[in-house]
Amino acid sequence: MEGALIRALRTAKRLSQATVARSIGANQPRLSLVERGHRKLTTRQSRELERLLALGEPSEDDSDPWFILVQHQEGRFEPLFDANDRLGIYRERGVAEIARQVLELAEIPADVAPAWLTYAATHAVRRLGKTATQDGVFVVGFEKSDRDTAAALVAHVGSIIEGESDGGEAAKRLAAALRHRGRPDEEGQEA
């Protein structure tokens, strides 16, 4: 994660640098340098940071956060929706980063933020209404090949529209359906 995004997520959760640093096995001066873009974290520290700062709260079914494209300003995070009003949820940070780079080429600012699945589903429900289904969200990360992943990404990311929303029980149902949809079956394909 970029330093500015780390700082924005940390302050949105009202956590001090010292608290976050302790939680990920670093010290406060190092985290300060990371937030200013002068240092990097280890892979393990980065994963712990994603879990700690992920948007929303984990449910009992969540083991790791997913990734969504967001725009943020003054502590507010707005998930980005595609031209078909679908929210992209990415299982792998690297694939979400490709989507962010595509948007950058189109001069659309975005960040890749870790998010718990219920948070993402809540925003989809807020945008699409209580009748939101799996069709209102596309999950990227279990495609057959990198080429298929890139094709799906380009097809879904064309033009992004900001979303404003609120959730509830419908978001929980949608998150559960997406959790099942995002699990690979025995052959490694999307279930």
Image (tube, rainbow, N blue to C red):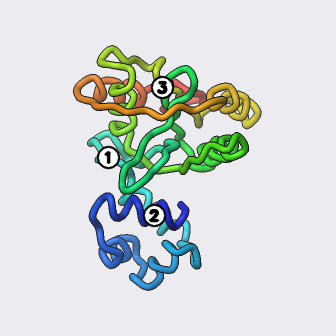
Give the CA separation, mark 3 to mark 1: 17 Å
Q: Which residue lies at the image location 48% right of the left edge and 50% below the top edge?
A: 113
Looking at the image, tell me whether mark 3 or mark 2 is earlier in sequence order.
Answer: 2
| Amino acid bearing label 1 | Gly
Circle 3 is placed at which residue position?
137
Name the foreground residue: 104 vs 139: 104
For marks 1 and 2, the one nearer the N-term is 2
Q: Secondary structure at mark 1?
A: loop
User: Relative to the observer, which residue lies in front, 110 or 50?
Assistant: 110
Q: Secondary structure at mark 3?
A: strand
| Residue with the mark numbered 2 | 6
Name the residue tied to disc 1. 56
Would you say 45 lies left or right of 151 here?
left
| Label 2: element kind | helix
Q: Residue at x 62, y 48 (%)?
A: 97
Residue lying at the far top in this picture: please name it. Answer: 131
Q: Position of residue 108 (x, y in %)?
A: 62, 43
Q: Amino acid at mark 2?
A: Ile
Alpha carbon distance from label 1 to label 2: 15 Å
Report x, y in % for residue 79. 45, 39
